[in-house]
Amino acid sequence: MTRNRILVVDDDSSLRRVMKMQLEEAGYEVSIASDGNQAYTMLKDLQPTLIITDLRMPTSGLQLLGRIAQEEIQTTVIVITAFGTVETAVEAMKMGAYDYVTKPIDFDALVLLVHRAMERQNLLEEVRTLRSALDQRYGFESIVGRSKKLLRLLDQAARVSQHDTTVLVQGETGTGKELIAHAIHQNSRRRAKEFVPINCGAIPKDLVESELFGYARGAFTGAVSNKPGRIEAADGGTLFLDEVGELPLDAKVKLLRVLQEGELPKIGASSAIRVDIRVVAATHRNLSAMVEDGTFREDLYYRLAVVPLQIPALRERREDIPELIDALFTRAKDRHHLPNARLSPGVLQRLISYRWPGNVRQLENVLERLLVLSSSDLICEEDLPEELQRASTNSGSLWPELPEEGVSLDGVERELITRALERFRGNQTQAARYLDISRRTLIYRMEKHGLPSDPFSGAI
């Protein structure tokens, strides 16, 4: 792919020439095509970073979009339409278009949109390069996704894996904390030794110390022999303490000694034994807030959080959801020997749009449930669990049906942004979160519609 190269596709020769001139003046290398077929034949040799295509022409822009999506051609597409209707623009966006412009074209706005689209495409190219490098060097193929947030996390995990530093992995339930911990172990010098996972919240409180630290013969009634604890089993390898915030106070004191001194205080033993372990801890709780509340030891927190890694929630990396669905559904089909099962487009769209409070684990469970309970190979919307059907209904159309006289998509978008800003008293971060877009995208769309950057600056 050649950076900053644009392919303009339109059956209006005069508009093609004007767009070519305007974009070349803005510093881009521009080629032109008269319809979707000609554009498609040019793609392989041209490898444009960006395509700007009209929707209504012989071999339409929608057909071109479909071929680009089907063959997974890595480019960004902006569509042009004189018919600013919800149907055509939304259909194009669903097929992968980045954004749209309407005729007559405001060329200043078009150049601004192209700048932003170029920045996005160049960033995606950097992301793909980083993902490939991480997979080849560190074997992170089992962790699915190419979002910027996930790749930043994987890059940090790859770097810290090369050192014996203690790591605290933080993230909501179901985000894959153990998967990250295991990847750190597999890429460390300790990979030949044991990776010992312990769910601190699953051990009964009266058994925590004996389970973690072990005990000597005669330490208590029934201790008829020496018992090594889980920490001792991890000697030379990696100890993974899942939900470390659930440990009782006495166990936290002894764990601190292990981290500080490398000494394991076995119950009933006259002296501690030396252990060589690397600790990766994980929690879904806010340990720093627990320190402030006095419910977690400050000294232990700083021993654990030498390198904190934050796993983003699935709703924070929505661009990874389609790839996750594909990987998890394929894995489930193989496991249950159901190779012909497939998701209908409606099911796929609802899965992509759902917020997934249980994160990747919930998505995996829902896909498996759909697979084993469906009465046919094609999984349809009525097969969805109630919570997804209810959420989809609640987040459905803004109107029961589209108005007969048509509607301006620009006007609808402007109204939605205005109302979201009003709802949050001009707070762009909250409004962007409410609209499920990035703050940068919100600011661009505010500029596009001529909305003031601070509409509430003069409010009482």
Image (cartoon, helix red, strand yellow):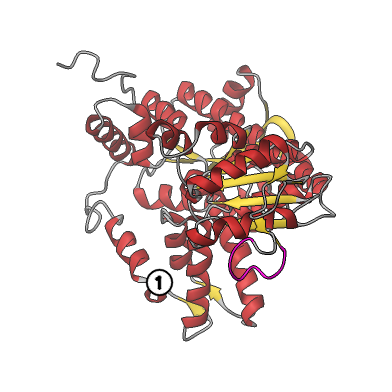
Residue position marked by numbered label 1 in the rendering = 384
Residue 167 lies in quadrant = top right
Q: Is residue 268 magenta?
A: no
Circle 1 Cα neighbour tier, 10 Å, few/some/many (<14 / 14–19 / ≥20): many
Check disc 1 and report its element: helix, strand or loop: loop
Residue 166 lies in quadrant = top right
Residue in the image at 36% along x and 42% along y? 84
Residue 408 place in picture, x, y as percent: 30, 41
Residue in the image at 48% along x and 39% along y? 99
Compared with residue 122, is residue 201 higher up or lower down, i.e. above or below?
Answer: below
Foreground: 16 or 418? Answer: 418
Q: Is residue 221 magenta?
A: yes
Q: Quadrant of the N terminus?
A: top right
Q: Main secondary structure of the magenta part?
A: loop
Q: In the image as oriented, which residue stretches furthest toward the top?
A: 458
Residue 289 place in picture, x, y as percent: 42, 34
Q: Which range of residues does the magenta coloring cover?
A: 219-226
Q: Quadrant of the C terminus?
A: top left
Q: Is any atom of residue 9 visible in this view?
A: no
Compared with residue 93, is residue 23 higher up or lower down, i.e. above or below?
Answer: above
Q: Is residue 417 left or right of residue 289?
A: left
Q: Is any atom of residue 384 visible in this view?
A: yes
